[in-house]
Amino acid sequence: MRNITLNVFVISGLLGFGGLYYYSGEVEEHYKTNANRYLKASLEKISSWEVADLKSELGKETLSEVSDQQLQELTASYRHLGAFTGMDEPVFSRLSGALSILNHPPKLSYSSNVRFEHGSAIMTATLTLENQHFKYYNLNLGAPANN
């Protein structure tokens, strides 16, 4: 009896994880084109490094948690990068896709190497949907790894 219970548990777990993996792939495919387009367009706008431009791309949840002073400090810390010039193909986080089944609206995470006028950065971004449009839930630009 104990082996049957264990087998059912293991098979159920495998089916559950397999289902989530498949679902996350479907989420990735559904949002891929529009998310890539949004990331490029929004980074172009944000790289003016003006608070108003950044605020216009942030989601309501994020705006309710950060102050104008924090946004001022953030834009000042990234201003040295200059204007956005391009990015590698964003990599979708399958974990965020799987967890999107629990979130409404979904929160989808991407990462990419991003190039600016005066340097490059590793971007990690979590996007959310508001009125059928992407907005940033979280955005980070970190120093690229030295090769």
Image (tube, helix red, strand yellow):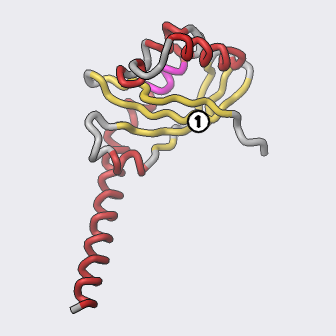
Rendered position, 104 above or below 95: above
Q: Quadrant of the C terminus?
A: top right
First to last magenta residue range: 38-43
Q: Quadrant of residue 122?
A: top right
Q: Main secondary structure of the magenta part?
A: helix
Q: Is residue 36 left or right of residue 50?
A: left
| Residue 127 x/y as whole percent | 41, 31
Tell me the SS state at disc 1: loop
Disc 1: CA contacts within 10 A as few (<14), some (14-19) or many (>=20): few
- Up the image or down, 106 lies above or below 120; here it is below
Residue 18 higher or lower than 5, as above or below: above
Position of residue 64 measured from the top left corner of the image (x, y, whole percent): 39, 19
Q: In the image, is residue 133 part of the stretch drawn in magenta?
A: no
**Count of numbered tags:** 1
Q: Is residue 131 left or right of residue 111?
A: left
Residue 92: x and y in percent read 46, 44
Q: Amino acid at mark 1?
A: Asp
Indicate yes or no whether the magenta region holds residue 40: yes
Judging depth in this view, the residue of 43 and 72 nearest the camera is 72
- Residue picked out by circle 1: 88
Q: What residue appears at the point 66 percent right and 31 percent down from the top-left corner?
A: 121
* Residue lying at 43% horizontally and 17% vertically, measured from the top left: 57
Pinpoint residue 109: horizontal percent, then vertical percent: 45, 39
Q: Please, which residue is most extreme toward the right here?
A: 147
Q: Quadrant of the N terminus?
A: bottom left
* Residue at the (31%, 40%) spot, across then down: 30
